[in-house]
Image (cartoon, rainbow, N blue to C red):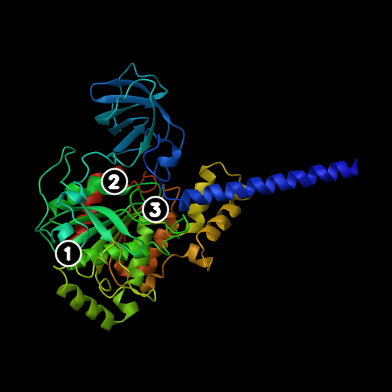
Amino acid sequence: MCLRTAALAATSVTFAGAAALAAGRYAADAALRPARPGTSPGRAQLPAGFGGPPLTVHTVGDGHVSLTRSLTAQLPGVYGLVGRDCHAVVGPVLDGEPAKAPADTVVRRLERVDRGELKPGSRVWLTPQIYADDAGGPADASDGTGGTGGAGGAGGAGTGGETGTGDDGLPLRTAVQVPGDLGPLPGWFVPGTRDTWVVTLHGLGATPAQALPLLPFYAGLGLPVLGLAYRGDAGAPPPPDGVRHLGGTEWRDVEAAVRYAVESGARQVVLHGWSSGASMALSAAERLSSRRTGADAGTEARTDGDTDAHTGARADDGDGTHDGTPDGTPDPAAVGRIAGLVLDSPVLDWWAAVRALAAARHTPRALLPLAVRAAQGRAHVQEPERMRQLVDPAALDVPVLVLHGPDDTVASWQRSRELAEAGGVSVDLHVVPSAPHAAMWNADPEAYEDRVRRFLTPLM
């Protein structure tokens, strides 16, 4: 009996250990594995923080839709609804809901249906991406309007490329290829009249379409916008080991985008990132700081970039790649060119983020530390503390706007507050209540854009 009990105990421990390891790897993959669009909608295809139970569509009327009542369905603001072969956009909860609406439903304004059909019984998820990835997409880079790099791809800062509005109501976008150290990075470009560019960086589980709602806003300011797909995204080179590295390698793709902008005529660049994209922006700003690399490097970067701005000679090695610097140091062409950062829900504490993602996958609390260790191992993080403090605030030498709120369940709100306090006057925190992860614009588009406008005005 004792031997049988011991054997059963050993088997249970082995099984629990294997299950814990699998749960840890599964949660780590949620943070590190690149999302791949194109499969049927589900939790894995949704941005982080939006993978809860689906909502059921109860009724669809003229300008309104009723959904299963839940905290998610009642979120204030504008959101996308995504289901199988369906994408729609809903506005705020309607005041004075129809008297016949059941108590277990929420009635929201229906703005539009972009794809498919929204009908009773449909199972949908809320998403901050209010534009489908393929809606009104950019022109093919191979059709002569795009190009593969340098000034020819973007047409210069505000002088080339098409203007006007596409079928989706957004400014027309031209497909471009940004030469990176792993290969060409696909992106889209919207021209503007200024020589300050905006480079957008999407977040966990999202795609470059995350930036699309802000294109009319940036067009109104005359700012050219480069939307970047980075390593692991659809059409971009995969990470060599199949996982992302918490900004440890991805900052090179941001560097490539900055270099591309400079060689296409930009004087300086503002990085606008969401979630993990905001973390990438911080990592790039720290590494490409003139203070860190030396004033001489920054001076050399400006001279070299201005010389080659309209040739694109340095941008491409002939195969869509750019080797950068062989010793891993920042490329002088990109040093000192970042003028500011706009950070939406930045992931500043990967330890907390991985735990949150694991908990959202119903990983038992006792097993959450395994998820963190799995993420640390898969991302090859040599210094565990790097997961807790992504960037040294003292290393930032550009103004930073953080847009974040206490209702984010993925990225640590406390870390954003600490960054604002430690960064002094150079870091401004705009608090957004009732907003999930990376959905600060969705919660209140007008207030969001007003705050970003006031931040950017001195930089333009």
Q: CA distance from mark 1 to mark 2?
A: 23 Å
Q: Which mark is residue 232?
A: 3
Q: Report the quarter where the C terminus lies.
A: bottom left
Q: Position of residue 193 (x, y in %)?
A: 10, 58
Secondary structure type for disc 3? loop
Residue at image position (40%, 55%) is 238
Sequence order check: which comes first, mark 1 or mark 3?
Answer: 3
Secondary structure type for disc 1? loop
Amino acid on which disc 2 is placed: Ala
Q: Which mark is residue 264?
A: 1
- Whether residue 193 is situated above or below residue 30 in the rendered picture: below
Amino acid on which disc 1 is placed: Ser
Q: Identify the residue under disc 2.
A: 209
Q: Position of residue 137 (x, y in %)?
A: 22, 43
Sequence order check: which comes first, mark 3 or mark 2?
Answer: 2
Q: CA distance from mark 1 to mark 3?
A: 25 Å
Q: Nearer the viewer, mark 3 or mark 2?
A: 3
Amino acid on which disc 3 is placed: Gly
Q: Report the quarter where the N terminus lies.
A: top right
Number of numbered discs = 3
| Residue farthest along the right direction in this orientation | 1
Secondary structure type for disc 2? helix
Q: Nearer the viewer, mark 1 or mark 2?
A: 1
Residue density around tag 2, few if under 14, some if 14–19, many if 20 or more, within 10 Å: many
Image quadrant where residue 113 sits: top left
Image-based side of 356 in relation to 108, left or right: right
Sequence order check: which comes first, mark 1 or mark 2?
Answer: 2
Residue at image position (42%, 54%) is 413
Q: CA distance from mark 3 to mark 2?
A: 15 Å
